[in-house]
C-alpha cells in the first residue's frame, strides 16, 4: 500500500478512530505515523508481510488490543512495552527469537500469545504481569520456564506444547487459578510435586513426553490420579532420586532399547569353548 497506507493512517488518526483493521492488506512496512493514532484501542495487523514494527507504535497510548498474527516479524521494538493499557497481545506465527526488556510493564495484560515463533526462553519479567490470565507459547524452542511464572496468580490457561522443555519450575504451583495446562510434546521426564497441588486444574496434557514409568502409569488413571500421586510420599522419594533428569537430555527410544539389549546380552552366561 506504501504511500496510500500512510494517508489512510493519517485520516484515521484525525478521525480519532478507536478501531483500525489492517489485516490482509499486503503490508510490508508499517508507516511511522501509526504512532499518531493515539485514540486507537484496537489495532489489527494480522496476515501481512511485515518483518518489523516501527518504534512509533509505542506512542499509541490508548491501545488495548494488538494482533500481529502471521507476519514475518523477527524482532519486537522495546517501545511496544510502553503500551501500558494493553490487554491482549497476539504475536503468534512469526519468526521472533527474543522478547524485548520491559515485558513486566504491562499492568492490564490478560492474554499473551507467542505461539509458533522461534523463542528459546521466556524472560523472568513475565512474573511481573500480575493480570495475566492466558499465556500461550506452543511451537517454539523453549527449554525451560522461568520460576517467576509462579507469581502470575491470576493465570488460568498455560499452553506450552511442542517445545523442548526439560523441566517445569516448582514455583508453578503458586498459580492456583490454573484451569488448563498443556505441556504435551516436550522433553519432560519428571514433574515437580508442587504441580499436584493445583486443585483448580481441569485439563492437563502431558502426552508425548519421555516421563519416567511411575508418572506414565499414574497418568493412565487420569488427571486426578496423577495429581494425587505427585503429592504422595512415594513420589517425593521418586522425585528426589530422579530430579537430576531435569537437567539431562532424554535418551532416544532407540538408544534406550540398544542399551537395554546390550545389558541383557552382557548378563547372559557366556558359553565356554571346548578344547581344540
Image (cartoon, rainbow, N blue to C red):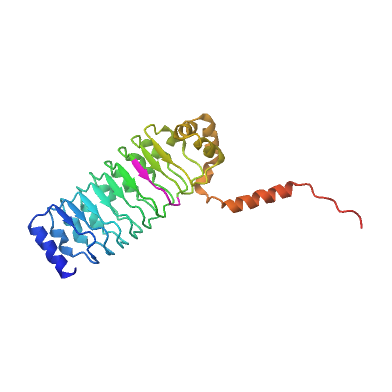
The residue positioned farthest toward the bottom in the image shown: 3
**What is the quadrant of the C terminus in the image?**
bottom right
Task: Give how far across and how far down residue 84 sits, in percent.
Answer: 20, 48
Residue reaching furthest to the front:
24
> Is residue 258 visible in the rendered structure shown here?
yes
- Viewer-proximal residue, 209 or 233? 209
Q: Position of residue 266 (x, y in %)?
A: 73, 49
Where is residue 46, by image quadrant?
bottom left
User: Left or right of 2: which side holds 70?
Assistant: right
Looking at the image, is 69 positioned above or below residue 51?
above
* Residue at x 23% of width, y 66% of height: 29
Q: Is residue 194 above or below residue 42?
A: above
Residue 262 x, y percent position in the rendering: 69, 51
263 displayed left or right of 230:
right
**Which residue is located at x 36 percent, y 43 percent?**
158
Q: Is 52 placed above or below 136 here?
A: below
**Left or right: 68, with 119 as reference point:** left
Q: Is residue 148 visible?
A: no
For the record, the magenta segment spans 157-164
Amino acid at each position: 500500500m506504501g504511500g496510500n497506507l500512510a494517508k489512510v493512517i493519517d485520516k484515521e488518526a484525525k478521525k480519532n478512530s478507536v478501531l483500525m483493521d489492517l489485516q490482509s492488506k499486503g503490508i510490508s512496512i508499517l508507516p511511522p505515523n501509526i504512532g499518531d493514532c493515539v485514540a486507537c484501542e484496537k489495532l489489527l495487523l494480522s496476515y501481512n508481510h511485515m518483518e518489523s514494527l516501527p518504534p512509533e507504535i509505542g506512542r499509541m497510548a490508548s491501545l488495548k488490543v494488538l494482533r500481529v498474527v502471521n507476519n514475518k516479524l523477527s524482532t519486537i521494538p522495546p517501545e511496544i512495552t510502553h503500551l501500558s493499557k494493553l490487554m491482549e497481545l497476539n504475536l503468534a506465527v512469526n519468526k521472533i527469537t527474543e522478547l524485548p526488556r520491559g515485558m513486566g510493564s504491562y499492568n492490564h495484560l490478560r492474554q499473551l500469545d507467542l505461539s509458533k515463533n522461534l523463542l528459546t526462553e521466556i524472560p523472568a519479567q513475565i512474573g511481573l504481569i500480575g493480570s495475566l490470565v492466558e499465556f500461550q507459547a506452543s511451537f517454539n524452542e523453549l527449554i525451560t520456564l522461568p520460576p517467576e511464572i509462579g507469581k502470575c496468580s491470576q493465570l488460568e490457561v498455560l499452553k506450552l506444547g511442542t517445545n523442548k522443555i526439560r523441566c517445569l519450575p516448582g514455583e508453578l504451583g503458586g498459580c492456583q487459578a490454573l484451569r488448563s495446562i498443556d505441556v504435551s510434546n516436550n522433553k519432560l521426564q519428571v514433574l515437580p510435586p508442587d504441580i499436584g497441588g493445583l486443585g483448580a486444574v481441569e485439563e492437563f496434557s502431558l502426552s508425548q513426553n519421555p516421563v519416567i514409568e511411575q508418572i506414565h502409569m499414574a497418568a493412565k488413571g487420569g488427571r486426578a490420579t496423577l495429581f494425587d500421586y505427585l503429592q504422595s510420599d512415594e513420589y517425593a522419594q521418586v522425585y528426589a532420586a530422579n530430579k537430576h533428569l531435569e537437567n539431562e537430555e532424554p535418551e532416544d527410544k532407540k538408544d534406550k532399547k540398544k542399551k537395554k539389549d546390550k545389558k541383557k546380552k552382557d548378563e547372559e552366561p557366556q558359553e565356554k569353548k571346548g578344547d581344540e
